[in-house]
Amino acid sequence: MISPFRLREAARIIQHGGVVACPTEAVYGLSCDPLNPRAVMRLLRLKQRPLEKGLILLASHIEQLRPFALLEGEWMPAVRASWPGPVTWLLPARPALPSWINGGRDTVACRVSAHPTAAALCDAAGHALVSTSANLAGRPPARSPLQVRLRCPGSDAILHDRLGDLRQPTPIRDPRSGETHRAG
């Protein structure tokens, strides 16, 4: 488990526009403040990822997602039942959501993580974070701190801890249509 000091330090880096690599359920992710456009653009440049692809928002509890997604609907019981846990859902985006988060779509990818370090980083930052795999776009994701440095250099800090038990990144599902956009 990460020390409280390291978590506070990582949260401070995020609050000042930095990018932090953090273990998640399956791979190391790059995190930043989703409402800081400079931080998001920097993260996208590090990954060489196009803005139009959108990003996943990671939270420690569902209330951290309320500023970004509409959390009402007949499908919400299924979403709530899967969280915290390794399922990313495409939820209806709030109308004023910046396009750098969701690529201009009417949905936003959200997950409430059960990974203790990822959730603790969200708590330390005080809000949901961007979480995208630590790798160049189209390349294998990092599964260790060393792989983060080699595959996607440029993060401001790396939180060293164990990954979760998943072999593949979390599935991405649409609760309204039942479609799976990425199998886990």
Image (spheres, helix red, strand yellow):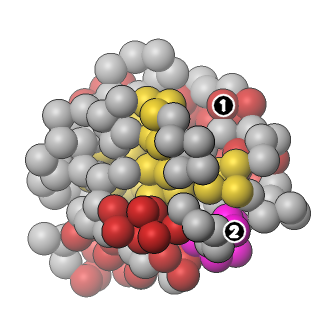
For discs 1 and 2, the disc positioned in front in the rendered view? 2
Drawn side of residue 2 relative to residue 136, left or right: left
Drawn side of residue 19 relative to residue 113, left or right: right
Drawn side of residue 69 relative to residue 167, left or right: right
Residue 1 position in % (x across, y down): 13, 71
Q: Is residue 30 visible?
A: no
On screen, residue 153 above or below 59: above
User: Residue at the location (42% across, 63% down)?
Assistant: 78
Q: Nearer the viewer, residue 121 or 68?
A: 68
Residue 145 drawn in magenta: no
User: Residue at the location (45% across, 70% down)?
Assistant: 77
Q: Which residues are the magenta region? A: 65-70
Task: Classify mark 2: helix, strand or loop.
Answer: loop
- Whether tag 1 and tag 2 are in contact, CB under 8 A, the answer is no
- Figure quadrant of residue 141: top left
Quarter of the image with the C terminus is: top left
3D distance between C-alphas at marks 1 and 2: 20 Å
Judging by the rendered image, the residue that carries numbered circle 2 is 70
Q: Which mark is residue 136?
A: none
Q: Nearer the viewer, residue 99 or 11?
A: 99
Task: Classify mark 1: helix, strand or loop.
Answer: helix
Judging by the rendered image, the residue that carries numbered circle 1 is 53
- Figure quadrant of residue 174: top right
Amino acid at circle 1: Lys
